[in-house]
Amino acid sequence: MPDNSPPGLTDEQAALRLRSDGPNVLPSASRRGLIRIAWSALTQPMFLLLLATAALYALLGNLGDAGMLAVSVLLVGGLSIYQEQRTERVLEALKDLSSPRYTVVREGRALHIASRELVRGDRLLVNEGDRLSADARILEAVGLQVDESLCTGESMPQSKHAGDGGGADEDKDDSGRLFAGSLVVRGDGVAEVSATGAQSTLGSIHRSIAQLGPRASRLQDELRQLVGRVAWLAVFTCVVAAMVFALREGSWTQGLLVGLTLAMSLIPEEFAVVWSVMLALGSWRLAKSNVLTRQPQAIEALGTTTVLCVDKTGTLTHNRMTLALLHDGEVQCNPAGEAPPPRFHRLLSGALHASCTGGIEPMDHAVRSMAQAAGLSEVDADWRPGARRGIREGAPYVVHWWHAAGECGQTVAVKGAAEAVLALCDADAVRMQRLRESAERWSAAGLRVLAVAQGHAEQAGDDGALPEGISLAPLGLLGFMDPLREEVPGAIEECRRAGVRVVMITGDAALTARSIARQAGLVDGGQAQVLTGKALAAMDDETLRRCVREVQVFARVDPTQKLRIVRALQQQGDIVAMTGDGVNDAPALKAADIGVAMGQRGTDVAREAASLVLLDDNFASLVEAVRAGRRIFTNLRKALGYLFAVHVPIVGVALIPVVMGGPVLLLPLHVVLLELLIDPACSLVFEAEPAPDDSMTVPPRRREDVLFSLALAVRAFTMGALVFIGVAAVQWGCRVLGATHEELRMASLGSIVLGNLLLLLWFRGSGVRVAHTNTVFHALLIGVCVVWGLLTAVPGVGSAFGLPGASSPWALWVVLPASWALWRIFSVSRRH
């Protein structure tokens, strides 16, 4: 911001307006309140079956059983509502994290805030790539063009300039106004927010936007097909079983009760719980690791990723540029935190004029800091700014025109890639050779090198471009150092062990990129294979496809060339995750299997196109996302296997009286108790399961691998069948010993619960080399022991559930597993 700019709102004024107007958000059509959540949960098949069974008991005159089922209805409904609300809270929190961020000026300070915190009167710094979320009046504009197609349907970008944008002419001329929902495609400026939230232009089209929802992922489609097949099997089995039992026993009422019980044990309502809870909480865990998941497809694809295409600046490095070296064409200077000699003031002054005044770009900030140390003012008092042109394809430099007092024509300051800027200069051959050699030497040492030049012309070219025939004088070189992040070498080595190749794509010079690649460990020795954007442009698609597997570094690459790189890798069969931060990165982010936007320096357009957002722009966070993606998919597969297996003994026990006769062993209340065990187990226990020890030492899973294959189904069915054999053996033994009907039910329920816990242990340990402590599992085990102790040790409780009413000395055995679980939980809490 210029020094004479107004300071903007105070923090107190902004807080007051935020309280009076509310946050800058539109009413969420997708957000579900308690009533909608309750209605959704209470219309689930399991809940309706419980109501039907309770009504049947009431008609038969068994008011006690009907009352117990009514209580169980509240328990099952309450658990479902709790899980739905928890998922909703997580999704709303993720929505807040994905809110666009803007730079505003308050009390003279530039603050980076979420869009929901914007208030009327805020001074908003508008930059290329911003998707506006509030209406504003333009105060300053430099080459500002805005795409308003979302609001007006007009496909051509509209030029904007400073103006009052209000009053009587407001409807006639909108060139001085910005509207919520529009996209800044070129230029920048300063605007004052005039309307937020539902009062903005975007509020009027909110309803149509709210109707657009994300498409279902492959996992959802596969899960839906699995649920449909199991549901049809359940309906057929229930009808047949009810008819067989009714015809044999001569009681259609008892047959209907058996059919309802069997339906309750077969309906796969937990599949939807597994999907929603595990993916929502998995996304929340990723967000706590500074990775925001915007699309569920990203989680599905993370485990299949074979190539990570990452930017250098800010991702592999800290993006904290400091001016390490200066060269004026004659001598070199290493400031080392001190003020440079006066002979370098002309170079620094030229670099200041070519920088964005008040901007937050790291290298511009480093230039201003060095200039201040040298005692130079940020803007010369007798110089007035003119047209400005940013980096363009084929022109990797910025151009800023100035009007100097008392001089004819205009002075231009140019700053950018050394080879491109020096190619525009005309000077002594020895001086030019010295500058080129220094630039090459600095790049080889890993520095980011920019050249600065200055020239004079009668007037600027179109759109601030350099006019034909202009001669620039080289002012010197700037050598910036951006240190490598300390955690990057270890993260890259972890990727290598996991079979994931890391490719660097950067706009830096080839020598700089090669140096950083060597420091980061992108190559196992020898020279890194580097392909420049110039060489890439000369290749056809087939040539690029053949060589792309051998290249570790792409240097001097334009954002538009990233799309070709992504497609070439995909044609080789790779699953590509690619990072990007600019407007021009959006097509490549969309084309990649996983687009990863930068949360701190990335534009809103890049974030919209991406499926993941790195909130801290850190490569190690991206590697952690790959680990988390593999963990989520593995645990989801384990949970589905457990669900498939756990229903086998339940259905088998429910079918025993149908096939062999005798008393009904599983009552609806028993199924309710089992559901209260299964629901938390299939979602919360497996969601809390840590990644397997070998999750990052095995190759990525293949794209065509299904979530729940036939082989996995057979294995799950086999484990469930083994548990059922154990339950059947217990039943046989009890019948031989002459057990009563209540004791047979007690034996069947106890053996099924024990089998459930054994299945949990087996599926949890599947693929894990070292046993992990899962606090949720141990808490669940304690809960099961408490409930079983109440049923068997407290007189009269068991009879309410069709079990023996007298206390049993065997109930004391539950103290052992409960004590073990308490000890494990205590050990974990003490360690943390």
Image (cartoon, grey):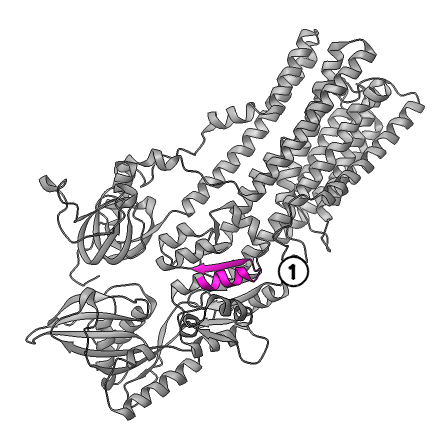
255 left or right, relative to 517: right
Identified at 25% across, 39% down, the residue is: 201
> Which residue lies under the disc numbered 1?
699
Identified at 79% across, 29% down, the residue is: 750
Name the image quarter holding residue 615. bottom left
13 left or right, relative to 570: left
Mark count? 1
**Residue 564 rendering spot, x and y as whole percentages:** 45, 63
Instruction: Please state which of residues 396 and 440 is positioned toward the viewer in this rendering.
Output: 396
Instruction: Please state which of residues 443 and 112 is positioned toward the viewer in this rendering.
Output: 443
Identified at 73% across, 24% down, the residue is: 237
**Residue 32 rendering spot, x and y as whole percentages:** 45, 31
**Magenta-span inclusion, residue 570:** yes
Instruction: Please state which of residues 574 and 331 is positioned toward the viewer in this rendering.
Output: 574
**Magenta-span inclusion, residue 377:** no
Quadrant of the rendering where the N terminus is positioned: bottom left
Residue 615 makes an appearance in the image: no
Q: How crowded is mark 1: few (under 14 residues within 10 Å), some or many (20 or more)?
A: some
134 left or right, relative to 613: left
Q: What kind of element bears circle 1?
A: loop
**Residue 825 rendering spot, x and y as whole percentages:** 67, 45
Residue 69 makes an appearance in the image: yes
**Residue 95 rendering spot, x and y as whole percentages:** 43, 43
Residue reaching furthest to the bottom? 430
Give the amino acid type for the residue marked by disc 1 in the picture: Pro
Residue 303's place in the image compared with 416, above or below, is above
Residue 798's place in the image compared with 279, above or below, is above
Which residues make up the magenta segment? 564-580
Residue 832's place in the image compared with 503, above or below, is above
